[in-house]
Amino acid sequence: MSHSTVPRSSAEATTKIPRPGHPVVSDGATGSAGKRPTGKLSLRVRFRRDRLLLLMTLPALGLILLFNYIPILGNVIAFQEYDPYISDNGAISMLNSPFVGLENFQRIFEDSAFWNAVENTLVLFILQIVLFFPIPILLALLINSVIRPRVRAVAQAVLYLPHFFSWVLVIAVFQQLFGGAGILSQLLRQNGYDGLDIMTNPGTFPLLITAESIWKDVGWGIIVFLAALASVSPDLYEAAAMDGASRWRRMWHVTLPALRPVIALLLVLRVGDALTVGFEQILLQRDAVGPGAGEVLDTFVWWNGVRNQDFSYAAAAGLIKGVVSLGLVLVANKVAHLMGEQGVYKK
Amino acid sequence: MTPNAASSGPSRRSFLASTAVATAAVAGGMPLLTACGGSEGGSRDGTTSGKDAQKILPAYVASNVVKPDIPSKNGSALGFTRKLDLAGLKTSVSKKLGKGGKVTVMSPFWGSPPKQNNAYYRAMNDLIGVDVFWQNQDGNTYDQKLGAVLASSDVPDVVVVPGWNMGGKIPSAIISKFADLGPYLSGDKVKEYPNLAAIPTDAWRRSIFGGKLRGLPMPAPSAPSMVPLYRQDIFEKEGYQVPKSCDEFMTLAKEITNARAKRWACLDMKWTAFQAFGVLSGSEKPLGWNLVDGKLVNRIETEEYLEALEWSRKLFAAGVVHPDSMMGKNAPDPGPKFAAGEFLIYPNNISQWWGRTAEQATQNPDFKIWGMDIWGHDGGDPTLWADQPAGIFAFVNKKASESVIRDVLAVANVTAAPYGTKEYMMTNYGVEGTHYTVKDGVPVKTDKGNIEVMNAYVMVASPAATLAHPDFPEVAKGQVEWEQRMGAFAKKSSFWGMQITEPARYTNLSNDAEQLEDDIVRGRKKISDMQQFVSDWKSKGGDKLRDWYQKILDENGSAAN
């Protein structure tokens, strides 16, 4: 999801390039002439100029409307005692279910299981930011320093591959290797040690989840950083080298500044997603450690909604999650602005 | 706890065990019941009984095609242990009742479903005259699908719902989404479908939901169905004795376990522990209540319940439980590791006794699985609780046209054919030459048969509980005798035999108890956490629920014996 924003900004860049037969109206903008001429154009002119690009966004816009915006209406059940079975159609059931005000929210705030899920979610989020987030950056730098294209291609392929395995498969592999009856434990037992309790130990569960995520998705995460690195002009490195900058200096003063906007952008997006810590992955392992350690907000919503059919309760929990996430994005974005970065959107 | 409790445990393939309570065993006993929660028959919660039920129930017309070798006793299934005369199979459905319509059925499936258009499905559809299209869903996670499917506007023509999946708002969905079959089956109307008329009345009584006959039942034996299964071949080889008390079990378990050699004694024994300590049944919410000294008590409030959890916990703590069991519901299928001897004992539905035998017969001739008698925890006789006389039901979509309903009943009339008929043989064994071969007069399933002739049609409606395995008659004998021995210790709790729909506001009350049980047994939570849970449960509605059940009891009388 987060990757889509990068091409978007580059597409934006292309719109600024004056095209033949469609000259950018130079209205004598002072200072950095031609840098942001779009702001001076009338809406109609801009619309005519960009109509092809706008047309191209329509299908995506339609999908977003259909799958992201229309379902928002369903949140109304959070304020109801919703029974989907009173009619043949979910929407009609929604109209006919009684409103109960904030009762569902009240129940949630009194529910220790909810707060347990919040706590687990936050612990996982922090662990993932600290342990997961820096690794793709380091790997991208490493791969970027490999000169031979063939070695580089192989390394990239190997790193990307696990991303395409389903969670079911990844967890099965972990289970076979590290499970209580897995290869590692059995090897230990044969040599007179106790077996390990990695897969079913609630205490270390957040670490396990993070380790699995790293194994599966770290390779995928480097793509955006590699793209950012590729856009750094070699001239800069040459100039720095001419000035006697060492490898480390070049990395510090050229490479990292080039990555900074991307890092800030992804960090903001990640913070916005803070309360989403891997639904499928955790659901698959929830019972192996029990809900005390294995319940996060998403599984809490799933358990109450899908499993217990307490849809209103689950919707209320989901809504709380959505509102908090929105707040987090805004705050993170503000922080990014204060640090001089662009963040997700400009003011 | 609660119906969904059972889903975690051992997979409930009771349909294989097939069967039901013979009528003789149940003829007496059941008091007539009257509707609770208002006199109108269609109330959403409560139960339907007495005159209201009489009006709805189908007439009973016995059909004994083949006389059972072991008649039902103590709530056991009918046992057939002699060779079946395959040449002389009777025909119970003389003319095709199906009108050639198309019927989609959503049903739980345990294992890997076969391809849609396979030889077995084709042969069955030919026999019935209906084009049945199967939507097989994973049985272990069926409850997760069910709620969403029923909430959609696209409910299949037929939906099979096991009793243990009737948590949350599912009962309310059953009442509002499924058709009343009364107009087709009540009273003498059922005689149009002779095999359905031969289904015991107790099973039909359980099929009344919200005052209407909505379910097509799979009759089940009321004798206990959860068996501690063990590897008899290894027991004999190593000289292990079957334990007779919880202490003996613990001693034996420690003797068996040798983690270094990849052998543990057992899986999670929680379900056996509940039986050994005499804990009320957890297979269905109403069965968890019983009248004790004039007061209704729920199973989670009892000392026995805590003791059973504590003992199960000790097994884990002693390291005699296979590490896979730590994973709870995420644990893999126990079959292959049991066959490999990684553990020697596990509790599961009685159907696995035969299922595992058949599975291993060719590759693993030494393999022998057998059922232990349940012991009283202190070495005395156990106190067991009777199961419901029907636990799995097929429902027809309310929107189905009459012709679809008739086609569904045509399907049910074939699948409910009794042992000894061509229809039974086709339903349970498939096509001769393709799905089974006859060796010395005994049908033996082929590999194809083992893949294709699984679940599906047997889920729609079944004959009176039957145990017949012509390929392994000694297993059928062992199963029926086990049911009869254990059935002798089984008591009926207050709400046995009733189909009770709890008020919606209470249905999720005890949902988390099962998770807590598993956490305690695995050492992640303490017994005191359960005590805390129970006291919360009481104040959150448990006590009110008690009053609600008391009212049903006052109006209908107790089923306890």
Image (cartoon, coloured by chain):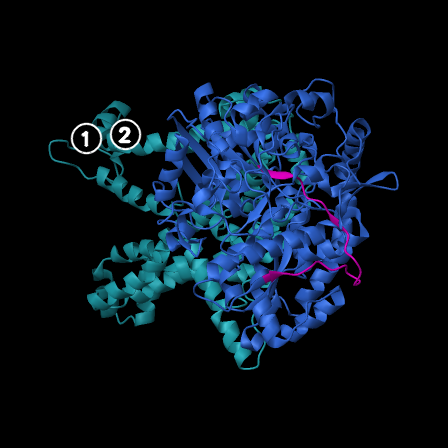
Chain colours: A cyan, B blue
In the rendered structure, which segment of residues is drawn in magenta? B370-392
Q: What is the x, y in percent for residue A314?
A: 58, 37
Q: Is residue A250 left or right of residue A135?
A: left
Q: Chain of mark 1?
A: A
Q: Between A330 and B44, which is closer to the camera in this rendering?
A: B44
Percent position (x, y) of residue B90?
47, 38
Residue B348 visible in the picture: no
Picture residue at 25% right of the left edge, 29% below the top: A55
**Which SS class for mark 1?**
loop
Tell me the number on the disc at residue A25. 1
Q: CA distance from mark 2 to mark 1?
A: 9 Å
Instruction: Decide: few, some or many residues near mark 2? Use Cα within 10 Å; few <14, some 14-19, many ≥20.
Output: few
Q: Which mark is residue B546?
A: none
Residue B145 in percent (x, y) is at 50, 39
Say whether residue A46 is left or right of residue B66: left
**Magenta segment, prevailing SS (helix, strand or loop):** loop
Residue, far right: B293
The image shows residue A251 at horizontal and vertical percentages of 33, 65
Q: Quadrant of the C terminus of chain B?
A: top right
In the shown orientation, is residue B213 left or right of residue A226?
A: right
Kind of residue at badge 1: Val
Chain letter for mark 2, please.
A
Does the CB distance between marks 2 and 1 fall below 8 Å?
yes
- Total tally of numbered discs in the picture: 2
Q: What amino acid does circle 2 point to?
A: Lys
The answer to whether residue B510 of the structure is visible from this angle is: yes
Using the rendered image, report if marks 2 and 1 lie on a common chain. Answer: yes
Dot label at residue A40: 2
Q: Is residue B373 magenta?
A: yes
